[in-house]
Image: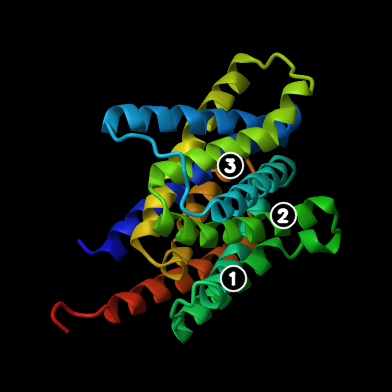
Amino acid sequence: MTDQFKGAGLMIGAFLLGAIEMALVHGIGDRASAMQLGFLRSLGHGLLLAVVVVVSGTPLIVRSNNIRIQLVRGIFSATGLWALYYTFAHMPLIDATALSYTRALFMTIFAALVLHESVRGVRWLGVALGLSGAALIIQPAFSNPNIVYVVGIAAPALNAAMQVSTKFAVRLDAINTTMFWVSAISFVLFCPAIMTEWAMPSGEILICLGLITIIGPITTYMSLWAIRFADVSLLAPFDYTRLILNVLIALIVFRELPTLYAWLGMAIIVVGCLAQTMRVGKNQPQPGA
């Protein structure tokens, strides 16, 4: 199995776990703030890192070979996470999911301009198809824009910047070192949540908060390894896999019925993703070539 396929498999798993995490955030709604959720996730990062270090027996190297990259990545990660939580808590699940797909555009642009990765025309076409499908899904919502949609656009842009900066981070430092800085910076930026009012959650909400604390860090860990194995621009299209899961969750759990535009948009997104994947597979160099 090539590194590119390993990276793709890990990223698909991370995206699917991320879909579940965002569905949990949507279910919690305004019963917990985005700052509070971010604070809990930062604690989960620290716990996962401790478990990984103990189980692997690998010493934790805190010192970074480029602290500026880790700081920049950590800030992008924390602010993007806050924006993502805010969006999914205050928008319909399908709309929030569709809007997040603008990240594919940002990731491909950043990968080409910052990482100097080779981005073939077919990938640009696939991104265009994906964004067109996303626009069809959310087009009714833009008739009445508000701050939620501004935050919703900022979230994928910040997340894409974080993913691209991750490529630099994992080249310079060990995965566990990057995880440490993610945890530390997130904790510092989200610690003001300690001073906010925390309402005693019901049993159902408490379970959701616990799952977010666990699932979120695992998602980050898987994506770090995925980006170490494969190009950012190659991994971007696989983000569309979570669309199917979130639609099912919206239909079954939240009783949110997609419109005809939403169904058409999702079909276009899937076609764009499949087209890129098939073409990329054909263009992989053969052994010994």
Asked if disc 3 and disc 2 are in contact, CB closer than 8 Å, the reply is no
Rounded to the nearest whole Å, what is the CA distance between mark 1 and mark 3? 20 Å
Indicate which disc, 1 or 3, sits on the residue closer to the N terminus: 3
Q: Amino acid at mark 3?
A: Met
- Label 1 Cα neighbours within 10 Å, binned few <14 / some 14-19 / many ≥20: many
Taking the spot 70% from the left edge, 13% from the top edge, the residue there is 200
Q: Secondary structure at mark 1?
A: helix
Q: Which mark is residue 138?
A: none
Front residue of 287/72: it is: 72
Vertical placement of 1 versus 268: above or below?
above
Snapshot quadrant of residue 228: bottom left
Residue indicated by mark 3: 22
* 24 with respect to 139 (left or right): left
In the structure shown, which secondary structural element does the residue marked by tag 3 occupy? helix
Instruction: Give the spatial CA distance, label 3 vs label 2.
Output: 13 Å
For label 2, count other residues whose C-alpha is less than 10 Å away and answer few (under 14), some (14-19) or many (20+): many
Q: In the image, what residue type sits under mark 2?
A: Gly
Residue 216: image x %, image y %?
51, 38
Q: Which residue is mark 1?
A: 105
Q: Residue at x 63, y 65 (%)?
A: 102
The quadrant where residue 42 appears: top right
The image position of residue 233, as x and y in percent, is 46, 70
Q: Which residue in the structure is indicated by mark 2?
A: 152
